[in-house]
Amino acid sequence: MMKVLSLITPVHAAGADYLASAYASLAAQQLPAGWEWEWLVQEDGEGVDALRRLPGDSRIRISQSRRGGPHVARTVALGRSRGELIKTFDADDVLTPGVLARDIEVLADHTDIGWTTSAVLDLLPDGSLTSFPGDPAAGRIASGTVLEYWEQHKRPQIHPATLCMRRSWVAALGGWMALPASGDTGLLLGLDAIGDGYFTPCVGLHYRKHSGQITALPQHSQGEEWQARMQIIGERARALKSLLADQPVWR
């Protein structure tokens, strides 16, 4: 039986036009022998019409849920997925060649690691690419390292849009944090509390920047909502780390 990697993509109307380029980057991926992918596209509310923008590929599974924001949509899609590995994939982003194979190989080679990430380049509206600042050293990321960096800078050192994770770890955390933004950062810090991760310095994603994305809104990085999001993200990560302090690495 083939092993499955599930890519999970929430999409709202503002990001739907990018689905075709996202699919092209996914369809070009070569997976290791014995593996296949499925793409869970979750429409966040009405009026998205993802079906019209994508080809008739049986590996694509589209569904709709009530508007709850991208991280609620991701968790709903997780409930429809069947993969033993779960990969974050935003509707407006582009996978680089070979990234899925690298993710699978890292988690196959390091059975005590629950998650892996990779380097990112920002894809600007003019088509140019710029680097994401502050990448860690290549290789194993010790549990607690991500939280330590986040406590100092209030942003993760590694990009949560590149996460590939063991299903059991994601399920144990209840999926993505149900926040209007930063739910993927909350998941990353939760994974970091559970156990070690891994960073691959090869660029795995082109992260598209555009005016329709949630991260472009002023309240994403300032104001009362931002403060509340940062508070609960950090509080949960610290609580998890404390609860697991005297326990063996969770698998």
Image (cartoon, grey):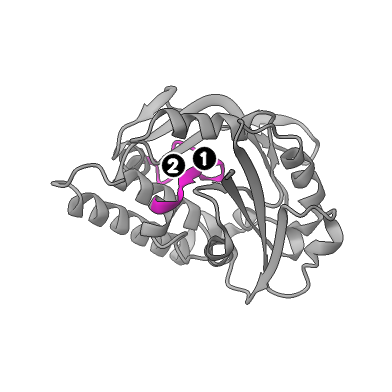
Q: For the point 71% across and 63% down, which residue is it? A: 62
Q: Position of residue 130 (x, y in %)?
A: 66, 30
Q: Where is the C terminus found, in terms of image quarters?
A: top left
Q: Please tell me whether residue 167 belongs to the stretch shown in magenta.
A: yes
Of residues 87 and 11, the one nearer the viewer is: 87
Of residues 142 and 102, the one nearer the viewer is: 102
Of residues 94 and 28, the one nearer the viewer is: 28
Is residue 121 placed above or below 185 in the rendered structure? above
Write down the region rendered in magenta: 153-168
Mark yes or no: residue 155 visible: yes
Q: For the point 54% across and 57% down, which residue is it? A: 220
Q: Please tell me whether residue 23 belongs to the stretch shown in magenta.
A: no
Q: CA distance from mark 1 to mark 2?
A: 7 Å
Question: Quarter of the image holding residue 231?
Answer: bottom left
Amino acid at circle 2: Pro
Numbered badge on residue 142: none
Question: Quarter of the image holding residue 156?
Answer: top left
Residue at far left of view: 246
Q: Where is the N terminus found, in terms of image quarters?
A: top right
Estimate how packed mark 1 is, as few (under 14), some (14 to 19) or many (20 or more) residues with alpha carbons within 10 Å. many
C-beta proximity under 8 Å, tags 1 and 2: yes
